[in-house]
Image (cartoon, grey):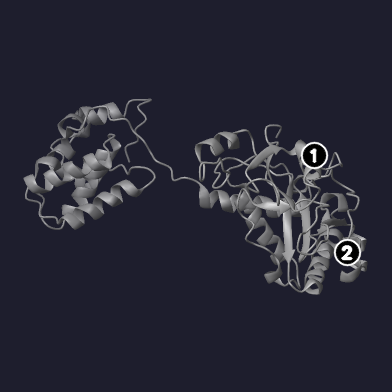
Amino acid sequence: MRRYQLVDFAAQFQKGFRNHVAPVANVPDLMRAYEHFECYATYFLFSPEILTYMELHPIDGRPSVSGFDGKIWAPYLPIDIDSEDLDRALVNARRMAEFLFMRKGLSAEACPVYFSGAKGFHFMLDTRALGRIIPSLHLHLVFSHFRKELIYEVSGLNQDVFDLTIKDKVRLLRLPNTVNQKTNLYKIQLLPEELFQLSISEIKEKASEARELYFTDETGLAAKTKSIRAHLELEKIFRRSSRIIHRLTRKPFHYFIKAKHGTDPEKFLCPGFLEMWHSHIPAGERNNSAIRLLSEFRRNGLSEEEARDLILDWNSRNSIGLSDRELAATLKSAYSRAYPYHFGCHDQIIHSFCPLKDTRKCDAWVKNREPGSGFCDP
């Protein structure tokens, strides 16, 4: 994770507000430079890849992190509780804390809790409690899904107070011990017992000044605790979320075969397929013949466009009579599968066209039966 040490720092009085990518180790100095007033940083960390991205994707002539699509990593997963009714936010924060710290036995070090200084609370779940997390293109989506899964596990929560829109790679989070301009209160860390015992007015009173950070450095993004054990139940939820996002975002598999004999069917079709290629096909067998020819074209490395040209020629030259719509549907069927379908010599339709009734006399059949040929004749 050593390459992932950059964050986007933002401050109210910083020129342009954001797009100031800096090492996370420099953030404390930046906070002091802006007197801990309205300071933010991304909670996802970036590799130097983001610097190249910014140069290549300027907005209004200035480098920008907007739309960054590279890999990201995070030391903490934030759970944000927001409500105009702070008492309601506190009730839900206590229910979440009871679930994490009492029912699940999570340590306070593994999930620092903050009063945001305005409308709610932040739970910062140390990602080491979720198992080994590596940089990923889709970590922001996994985090989002995990939050939803976790919230559904906790009984009695008002789900509308949880910010479930935190699912972009460059989302900012207010930094600890920085002042909120609207309330003139600090974002402060609360111990679990304080969260359960203090009223909103008492929490606000404590937030009138900066407080000690018990488990992290000044940024809230670097833990003081060297070792946090993976929590088996939370890790299980996270792994499930990862599998779901992987399934939803993985790219479709494209089976590729390099054409060995060009696009001339005379050079790669076996005797049975050649007979079909040159014959008029009566109604009732036309679609069956078309799908077999198209599948054989694909097996021999022809592109979908090349196969379309050939099947249109076959249809016209032999007066087959299939409509363009029928041929297009058959072509789509032949090329939409992950792997091309193989109609072998024992297929009844292929066998009916084959002029060689004894397959042992077919050079193509004999060659395909040789050990190590890679072919399987069904």
Q: Position of residue 237 (x, y in %)?
A: 69, 55
Any part of residue 346 in sight: no
Question: Which residue does the numbered mark 1 point to in the structure image?
Answer: 29
Residue 98 quadrant: bottom right
Q: Nearer the viewer, residue 225 or 35?
A: 35
The residue positioned 15% from the left and 32% from the top of the image is 266
Q: Nearer the viewer, residue 319 or 133?
A: 133
The residue to which callout 2 is attached is 195
Q: Is residue 49 left or right of residue 207?
A: left
- In the rendered structure, the answer to whether residue 252 lies left or right of residue 52 reads left
Q: Nearer the viewer, residue 59 or 194?
A: 59
Q: Secondary structure at mark 2?
A: helix
The tag earlier along the polypeptide, 1 or 2, is 1
Q: Residues within 10 Å of mark 1 (few under 14, many from 20)?
A: few
Establish if 221 lies above or below 364. below
- Tell whether 256 sits left or right of 291: right
Tell me the element at label 1. helix
Vertical relation: 48 (above or below) 78 = above
Give the quadrant of residue 341.
top left
Residue 288, compared with residue 262, is above or below; it is below
**Residue positioned 80% across, 41% down in the render:** 28
Q: Is residue 152 visible?
A: yes
Which corner quadrant holds the C terminus? top left
Residue located 26% across and 36% down the image:
302
Q: Amino acid at mark 2?
A: Leu
In this view, the residue in front, 172 or 102, is 172
Residue 90: x %, y % from top left: 82, 69
Task: Calculate the distance from the C-alpha at mark 1 to the C-alpha at mark 2.
Answer: 30 Å
Query: How dense is the environment of label 2, judged by Cα within 10 Å: few (below 14), some, or many (20 and up)?
Result: many
- Is residue 297 found left or right of 356 in the rendered image? right
Amino acid identity at mark 1: Asp
In the picture, the quarter occupied by the N terminus is top right
